[in-house]
Image: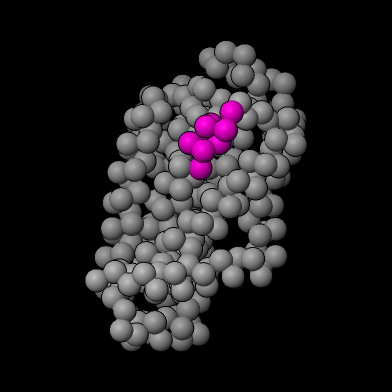
C-alpha cells in the first residue's frame, strides 16, 4: 500500500537539500549557462538551415533546458549511493514502509528540483533574448520537463541500485549522459544528421523531450508534439517502473 506520509517526507527532504545547497544549484546551472552564453549569444542571429527564420538562440534554448534536466536527473541517483554510504538508506529500508513509496518519494523530490532548475534556465534565457509567446507554452513546457526528469531519474536509479562506488557511478553517468545529449538534437537539427545516426537518435528519450520543448516553445519540431508526448510518456513510465524494480531488489548496505 502506498504511504503518502513517507512520500511527502522524502520529497520534503530532497527539497530542503536543494534549497540549502546553494553550491549545488550554481554547479548544475553553470554548464547550461555556459552553452547559452557562448553558443546562444555567439550564433544568436544565425538562421538554422531548414528551420525557416528561427534564429539560433531560440533553437538552442529548448535543447539547453533539456540538457539541464538530463544532467540533474541522471546524477540524482548519486543520492542513493550517498544514503547507502552514510547508513540513511538502511534506516528507511527497515522502516515499515513499502519500497514503492520510497521510490515515488525520491522520484517526486528529484523531479521537482529538476523542473525548478529547468524553469530557472528558461528564465535566464529570456534575459538573453529568448521569447515565450504565451502562458500555455510555458505550462506545456513544464509537462515535458517533468517527463524528461522522471525518465532519467528512473534511469539513474537503475544504475545507482546496481552500483556501490560513487566515483564509478559518476564516470558511468558521464559516459552515458554526453551521447544522450549530443544525439538528442539539442545543438543542431536532426535533419542535418545522416540517416543511420537519425535512427540511433530515435531510441534516445531526450530526443523527444527536446523536440517537444521546441514544439511548444517556438512552434517548430521534427516530430509532432503529440507524438513526442506519447513516446516520452512511454519512456517515463518504463524507466520509473524499472527504477522502482531494481531499487526494490537492491541491498541497503
Is 14 positioned to the left or the right of 155 in the image?
right
Displayed quadrant of residue 125: top right
Q: Residue at x 38, y 57 (%)?
A: 155
Instruction: Reply above or below: 95 against 246.
Output: below
Residue 196 location (% of width, % of height):
36, 28
**Relative depth, front residue between 246 and 25:** 25
Q: Residue at x 33, y 57 (%)?
A: 240
Residue 110 location (% of width, % of height):
49, 61
Displayed quadrant of residue 247: bottom left
Residue 80 location (% of width, % of height):
45, 72
What is the chief secondary structure element of the magenta stretch? helix
Is 42 positioned to the left or the right of 197 in the image?
right
Instruction: Reply above or below: 113 against 93.
Output: above
Residue 137 highlighted magenta (yes or no): yes
**Relative depth, front residue between 124 and 134:** 134
Q: Residue at x 31, y 79 (%)?
A: 97
- Number of callouts: 0
Magenta segment boundaries in residue numbering: 134-142
Amino acid at each position: 500500500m502506498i504511504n503518502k506520509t513517507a512520500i511527502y517526507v522524502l520529497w520534503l527532504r530532497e527539497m530542503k537539500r536543494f534549497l540549502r545547497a546553494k553550491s549545488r544549484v550554481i554547479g548544475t546551472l553553470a554548464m547550461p549557462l555556459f552553452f547559452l552564453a557562448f553558443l546562444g549569444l555567439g550564433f544568436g542571429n544565425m538562421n538554422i538551415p531548414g528551420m525557416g527564420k528561427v534564429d539560433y538562440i531560440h533553437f538552442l534554448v529548448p535543447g539547453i533546458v533539456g540538457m539541464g534536466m538530463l544532467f540533474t536527473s541522471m546524477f540524482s541517483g548519486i543520492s542513493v549511493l550517498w544514503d547507502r554510504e552514510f547508513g540513511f538508506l538502511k534506516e528507511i529500508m527497515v522502516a515499515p514502509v513499502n519500497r514503492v513509496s520510497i521510490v515515488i518519494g525520491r522520484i517526486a523530490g528529484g523531479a521537482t528540483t529538476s523542473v525548478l532548475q529547468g524553469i530557472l534556465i528558461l528564465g535566464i534565457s529570456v534575459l538573453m533574448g529568448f521569447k515565450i509567446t504565451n502562458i500555455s507554452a510555458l505550462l506545456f513546457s513544464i509537462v515535458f520537463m517533468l517527463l524528461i526528469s522522471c525518465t532519467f531519474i528512473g534511469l539513474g536509479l537503475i544504475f545507482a541500485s546496481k552500483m556501490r562506488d560513487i566515483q564509478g557511478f559518476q564516470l558511468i553517468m558521464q559516459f552515458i549522459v554526453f551521447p544522450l545529449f549530443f544525439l538528442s538534437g539539442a545543438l543542431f537539427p536532426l535533419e542535418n544528421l545522416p540517416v543511420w545516426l537519425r535512427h540511433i537518435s530515435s531510441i534516445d528519450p531526450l530526443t523527444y523531450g527536446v523536440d517537444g520543448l521546441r514544439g511548444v516553445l517556438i512552434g517548430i519540431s521534427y516530430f509532432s508534439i503529440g507524438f513526442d508526448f506519447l513516446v516520452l510518456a512511454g519512456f517515463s513510465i518504463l524507466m520509473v517502473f524499472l527504477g522502482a524494480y531494481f531499487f526494490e531488489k537492491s541491498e541497503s548496505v
